[in-house]
């Protein structure tokens, strides 16, 4: 089951005479912040993992920690065997995960923007051509994360969580 986390939109300051709604700017700012955060997170975790394994006894410390956490020795051995066998493919995993997460958030942004456009046109009475309004609704519904029948793409490998 996927845990849903609600992150509040960034606050923006608006002039008193502003006519624009802040929501499109807020979701754009959040998308920009989130994208930068994702890239920075993967840079840090990739660098930290690489630096850790290069420490004296880094490999042994990692093995000890995983075995203490419940991994069996044969799983450790086969894991390293597969890691060596597929290491050329795994070199791109961090980049692929970052792209998958950014793409997922971009879909969220496009969906929220489409929902806002539909809301704005319906609440202001501004006549948006019925065909375009129908397309926007369909697009927003198709991208909706609330649609449990749609499966989100899964990365081929889930990187370990590292607290900084």
Image (cartoon, helix red, strand yellow):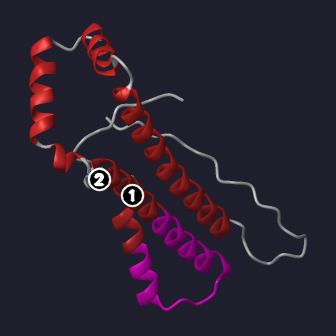
Residue 104 place in picture, x, y as percent: 39, 58
**Residue in the foreground of this view, choosing between 50 and 2:** 50
> Is residue 64 placed above or below 118 in the rendered structure?
above
Among the 4 quarters of the image, the one containing residue 52 = top left
Q: Where is residue 149 in the image (x, y as percent from the top left)?
A: 25, 53
In which quadrant of the rendered view does residue 96 lie? bottom left
Secondary structure beneath label 1: helix
Name above or below for residue 60 compared with residue 134: above
Residue 80 in the magenta stretch? The answer is no
Residue depicted at 59% across the width and 77% down the height? 122
Q: Name the residue under label 2.
A: 152
Q: In this view, does 141 lie to the left or right of 60?
A: right
Q: Residue 104 carries which label?
A: 1
Magenta span dominant secondary structure = helix
Q: Which residue is drawn at 69% across and 54% down?
A: 10
Cα distance in 3D space between marks 2 and 1: 8 Å
Q: What element carries label 2?
A: loop
Badge 2 vs badge 1, beta-carbon distance below 8 Å: yes
Q: Which of 135 and 27 is in front in this view?
A: 27
What residue lies at 60% left-to-right and 62% top-to-bottom?
A: 27
Q: Earlier in the sequence, mark 2 or mark 1?
A: 1
Q: In this picture, which residue range is highlighted in magenta?
A: 109-137
Please identify the residue farthest to the top as the structure is shown: 68
């Amino acid at each position: 089951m996927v845990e849903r986390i609600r992150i509040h939109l960034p606050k923006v300051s608006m002039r008193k005479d502003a006519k624009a709604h802040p929501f499109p700017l807020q979701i754009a700012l959040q998308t920009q912040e989130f994208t930068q955060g994702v890239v920075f997170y993967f840079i840090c975790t990739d660098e930290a993992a690489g630096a850790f394994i290069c420490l004296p006894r880094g490999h042994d410390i990692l093995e000890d920690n995983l075995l203490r956490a419940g991994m069996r020795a044969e799983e450790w051995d086969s894991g390293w065997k597969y890691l060596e066998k597929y290491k050329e493919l795994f070199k791109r995993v961090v980049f692929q995960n970052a792209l998958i997460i950014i793409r997922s958030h971009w879909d969220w942004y496009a969906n929220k923007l489409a929902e806002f456009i539909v809301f704005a046109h319906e609440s202001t009475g501004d006549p948006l051509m019925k065909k375009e309004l129908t397309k926007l609704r369909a697009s927003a519904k198709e991208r909706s994360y609330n649609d449990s029948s749609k499966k989100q793409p899964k990365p081929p490998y889930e990187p370990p969580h590292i607290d900084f």
